[in-house]
Image: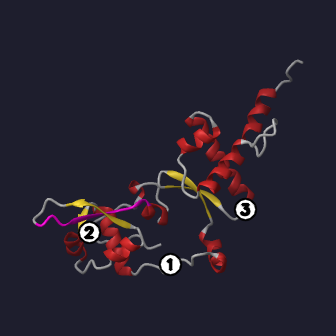
């Protein structure tokens, strides 16, 4: 049978739809299913493996998937974070879902904890003494930040006594919606008090 004009274009559209003409899940369906099943951010390379397509094709399909979600207004969207992608509920919807979330969300970090976290994020790897010198106060909240898995010990300094060096974790990137540390807002001077507040 002779191909009709535009048949190649039609096949391309089907590849991105919810279901292909063969009855198999389309790219958008596979991307959504992979993100829900993984329970963690997936990189474009991982999604390319799921789709069985080249990386540049996967990146194009991921962008199309994100645009389709936004257009559909389903109450969640695609977020690029920590070097990958995940499905998230926007802040305006999260508050309404608090009664059904388990475990309940952790209390907000104190101002002091946020300042310590900002010092670590911008100056890592950094020792506790250096944090206190930069803040002009105690760095006791480092323990809280470790318990929240936002910072971790990344080594020891060559200084006398070899004090511990602290750095941020992947969870830090996830919690603040950052793709990498390069996405931190510009820092001018040594005032950390206004950073990472929300």
- Residue beneath disc 3: 74
For the residues labelled 3 and 1, the Cα–Cα distance comes to: 26 Å
Report x, y in % for residue 191.
29, 72
In front: label 2 or label 3:
3
Q: Which mark is residue 106?
A: 1
For the residues labelled 2 and 3, the Cα–Cα distance comes to: 42 Å
Task: Residue 126: name its quadrant.
Answer: bottom left
Q: Residue at x 24, y 80 (%)?
A: 137
Callout 3: few (<14), some (14-19), or many (20+) C-alpha neighbours within 10 Å?
few
In front: label 3 or label 1:
1
Q: Residue furthest top?
A: 2
Assign a secondary structure to mark 1.
loop
Q: Which residues are magenta?
A: 161-170
Task: Residue 153: name its quadrant.
Answer: bottom left
- Residue beneath disc 2: 190
Report x, y in % for residue 37.
63, 55
Report x, y in % for residue 164.
22, 66
Q: Residue at x 25, y 75 (%)?
A: 135
N-terminal-most mark, 3 or 1: 3
For the residues labelled 2 and 1, the Cα–Cα distance comes to: 29 Å
Mark 2 touches mark 3? (CB < 8 Å): no
Task: Residue 155: name its quadrant.
Answer: bottom left
Q: Which mark is residue 154?
A: none
Q: Is residue 151 left or right of residue 90?
A: left
In this view, the residue in front, 112 or 107, is: 107
Mark 3 touches mark 1? (CB < 8 Å): no
In front: label 2 or label 1:
1
N-terminal-most mark, 2 or 1: 1
Q: Residue at x 54, y 77 (%)?
A: 105
């Amino acid at each position: 049978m002779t191909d009709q004009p535009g048949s190649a274009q039609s096949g391309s559209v089907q590849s991105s739809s919810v279901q292909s003409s063969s009855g198999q899940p389309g790219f958008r369906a596979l991307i959504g299913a992979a993100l829900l099943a993984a329970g963690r951010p997936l990189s474009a390379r991982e999604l390319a493996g799921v789709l069985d397509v080249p990386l540049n094709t996967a990146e194009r399909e991921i962008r199309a998937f994100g645009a389709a979600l936004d257009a559909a207004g389903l109450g969640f969207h695609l977020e690029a974070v920590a070097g990958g992608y995940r499905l998230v509920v926007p802040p305006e919807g999260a508050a309404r879902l608090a009664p059904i979330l388990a475990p309940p969300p952790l209390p907000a970090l104190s101002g002091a904890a946020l300042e310590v976290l900002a010092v670590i994020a911008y100056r890592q790897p950094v020792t506790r003494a250096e944090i206190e010198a930069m803040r002009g106060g105690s760095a006791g909240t480092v323990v809280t930040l470790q318990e929240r898995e936002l910072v971790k010990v990344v080594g020891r300094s060559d200084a006398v006594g070899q004090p511990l060096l602290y750095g941020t974790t992947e969870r830090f990137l996830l919690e603040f919606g950052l793709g990498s540390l390069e996405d931190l807002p510009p820092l001018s001077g040594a005032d950390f008090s206004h950073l990472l507040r929300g």
